[in-house]
Image: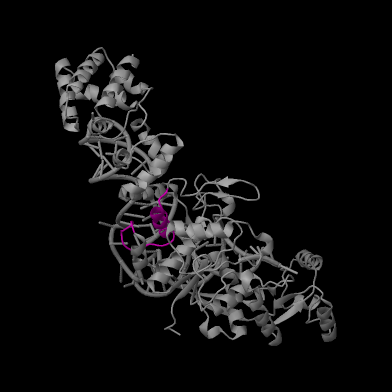
RNA sequence: GGCCCGUUCGUCUAUCGGUUAGGACAAAUGGUUUUCAUCCAUUAAAGAGGGGUUCGACUCCCCUACGGGCUACCA
């Protein structure tokens, strides 16, 4: 058993966009698999046909691709020997195991209607008892345990609607070892006879998940904490099906919480929190509502991976910047924390900033080119690349590229008032005139020569650099801050630089 | 309500019985950068409360409080 190849799965249901909590779950699965030389599988859990959202499945696939954690097996990533990987396509497989449970007395047919179930719950609630379908209440309901055998048979043959429920023991301690939390104990007296097989002929999540994990040879189930309460049920299913000896190990991850601490992050949060909850932009096909994505908000996938990894895990060292391979190397489940983590926008921004500085300029060039296209601006790639090299230190998100570099492509027409008020005086036009004259005479337009000309202009007018340099910047770009001035001017080129200064001279009063 | 899980600076976290409780983000201050962004330095900032166990508890146990999750023919 110990030499079984590690196989883990990420098993989202296609009920909408995948949110970053889901991406983190996928990431931890990926890291664990790669760390142990195992397989990472994408399985689509679409047993609820009523909640299917068109496009969601493709969205999940695209998201995993964008962040760079691609499953090596599963829907959209190559069907292996365990195909299919979509539960709706595995429908036929589940029935035999349901029948097995039925035959072995671990499950039973139930014919109660929704109304009857509601009535039962209300009745129990009124008498202050837990309203659950359990070892006690099932004796008062309509099922194969209370019905005469021939009546059950008649109903089944008649095609009456039914579900199959697990038959839990009245009082039995169920325990399992969670890789993150240690031993967890639950008594079946607090659980209920969950539906395993729905009246539409589909298994519920509980049944499908056990059958699939078993038949796909899954060795470790790494999923969100919201599944912790149903884990005992799953353990019992493995036991009743006779698979307990190869039952996967469980690891329930702490949840990603909203920054205000009120509840877990949900896909319904969309843009309400002031930061994206989705990796990619998502348009809800039903409401038409568009929610922003990390990609479109200017995040780099490497940054998203890194910041997500650290929301609930840490290496135990002071290193905070990790590439994906480094994460694979460092990741262990025992360093995953037990408590939920609130998403921190500031930290996320910081991470992205770190990665923007490290990223290959080509990525930034590509991004800026897109932004230029949007404004219908044409520029040669070489120039764009130099611009990116100059402004990459200034930005936190790739989408800020244009905001910080627009004056490289469009000469300014408005000038920062604060700087003008502070620095523009009677000598300024004189310095500007001299500077223009000296620059016209500069043949080799390098930043060093520009600086020389600049200093000459200052000397002639007995003006200190402190008094004029920022004014020089505003004349060239219109704004108060930016990259080193002389390098910038070199990039603008002689003609544009002089033109900018001439314009400034005319416009600034 | 019931069950389960959790609780260290504002946030993410380190600490696996003995530490001046460490780091990062954010914040504040100072310096560098003629500007902005950086960068550097400094400061401020935490063991929910109460009982045990122990020579000694942030660390182990119990209770309370608080937070979160689950409680569907949803996953």
At x 73%, y 80%, the residue is A108
Residue A259 part of the magenta-drawn span: no
Residue B45 against residue A481 in the figure, above or below: below
Rendering quarter of residue A96: bottom right
Q: Position of residue A137 (x, y in %)?
A: 76, 75
Q: Quadrant of the C terminus of chain A?
A: top left
Is residue A315 visible to the viewer in this orientation of the structure? no
For the question of whether residue A408 can be seen, the reply is: yes
Q: Nearer the viewer, residue A493 or A167?
A: A493
Give the x, y percent position of residue A189: 66, 76
Nearest to the observer: residue A399 or residue A305: A399
Q: Which image quadrant for residue A395? A: top left
The quadrant holding residue A497 is top left
- Taken as a whole, is the magenta stretch helix, strand or loop? loop
On the rendered image, what quadrant is the N terminus of chain A found in? bottom left
- Identify which residue, A424 or A128, lies in the foreground: A424
Q: Position of residue A339 (x, y in %)?
A: 48, 62
Horizontally, is A247 left or right of A438 in the view?
Answer: right
Q: Colour scheme used in the picture?
A: one colour
The boundaries of the magenta stretch are A299-322
Q: How many marks?
A: 0
Q: Is residue A308 magenta?
A: yes
Q: Position of residue A170 (x, y in %)?
A: 68, 80
Q: Residue at x 61, y 59 (%)?
A: A15
* Residue at left offset 65%, top offset 47%: A287
């Amino acid at each position: 058993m110990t030499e079984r190849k590690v196989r883990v799965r990420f098993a989202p249901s296609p009920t909408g966009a995948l949110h970053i909590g889901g991406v983190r779950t996928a990431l931890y699965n990926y890291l664990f698999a790669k760390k142990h030389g195992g397989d990472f599988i994408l399985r689509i859990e679409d047993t609820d046909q009523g909640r299917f959202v068109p496009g969601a499945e493709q969205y999940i696939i695209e998201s995993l691709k964008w962040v760079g954690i691609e499953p090596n097996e599963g829907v959209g990533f190559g069907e292996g020997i365990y195909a299919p990987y979509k539960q709706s396509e595995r429908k036929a497989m589940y029935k035999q195991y349901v029948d097995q449970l039925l035959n072995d007395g671990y499950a039973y047919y139930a014919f109660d209607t929704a109304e009857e179930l509601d009535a039962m719950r209300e009745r129990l609630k009124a008498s202050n008892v837990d309203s659950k379908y359990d070892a006690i209440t099932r004796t008062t309901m309509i099922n194969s345990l209370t019905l005469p055998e021939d009546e059950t048979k008649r109903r089944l043959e008649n095609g009456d609607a039914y579900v199959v429920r697990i038959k839990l023991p009245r009082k039995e301690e169920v325990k399992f070892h969670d890789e993150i939390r240690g031993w967890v104990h639950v008594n079946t007296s607090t659980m209920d006879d969950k539906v395993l097989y729905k009246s539409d002929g589909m298994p519920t999540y509980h049944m499908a998940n056990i059958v699939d994990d078993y038949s796909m040879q899954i060795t470790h189930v790494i999923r969100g904490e919201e599944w912790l309460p149903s884990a005992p049920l799953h353990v019992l299913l493995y036991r009743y099906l006779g698979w307990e000896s190869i039952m996967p190990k469980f690891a329930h991850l702490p949840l990603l919480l909203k920054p205000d601490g009120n509840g877990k992050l949900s896909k319904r949060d969309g843009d309400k929190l002031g930061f994206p909850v989705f990796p990619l932009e998502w348009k809800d096909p039903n409401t038409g509502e568009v929610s922003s994505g990390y990609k479109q908000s200017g995040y780099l996938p490497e940054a998203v991976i890194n910041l997500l990894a650290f929301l609930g895990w840490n290496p135990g060292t002071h290193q905070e910047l990790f590439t994906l391979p480094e994460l694979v190397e460092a990741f262990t489940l025992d360093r995953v924390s037990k408590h939920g983590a609130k998403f921190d926008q500031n930290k996320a921004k910081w991470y992205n900033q770190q990665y923007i500085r490290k990223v290959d300029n080509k990525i930034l060039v590509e991004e800026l080119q897109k932004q230029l296209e949007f404004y219908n601006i044409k520029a040669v790639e070489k120039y764009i690349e130099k611009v990116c090299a100059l402004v990459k230190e200034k930005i936190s998100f790739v989408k800020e590229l244009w905001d910080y570099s627009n004056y490289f492509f469009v000469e300014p027409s408005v000038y920062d008032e604060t700087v003008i008020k502070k620095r523009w005086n009677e000598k300024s036009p004189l310095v500007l005139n001299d500077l223009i004259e000296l620059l016209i005479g500069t043949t080799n337009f390098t930043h060093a020569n520009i600086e020389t000309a600049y200093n000459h202009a200052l000397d002639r007018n007995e003006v200190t650099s402190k008094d004029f340099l920022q004014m020089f910047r505003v004349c060239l770009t219109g704004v108060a801050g930016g990259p080193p001035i002389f390098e910038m001017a070199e990039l603008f080129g002689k003609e544009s630089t002089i033109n900018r200064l001439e314009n400034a001279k005319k416009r600034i009063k």
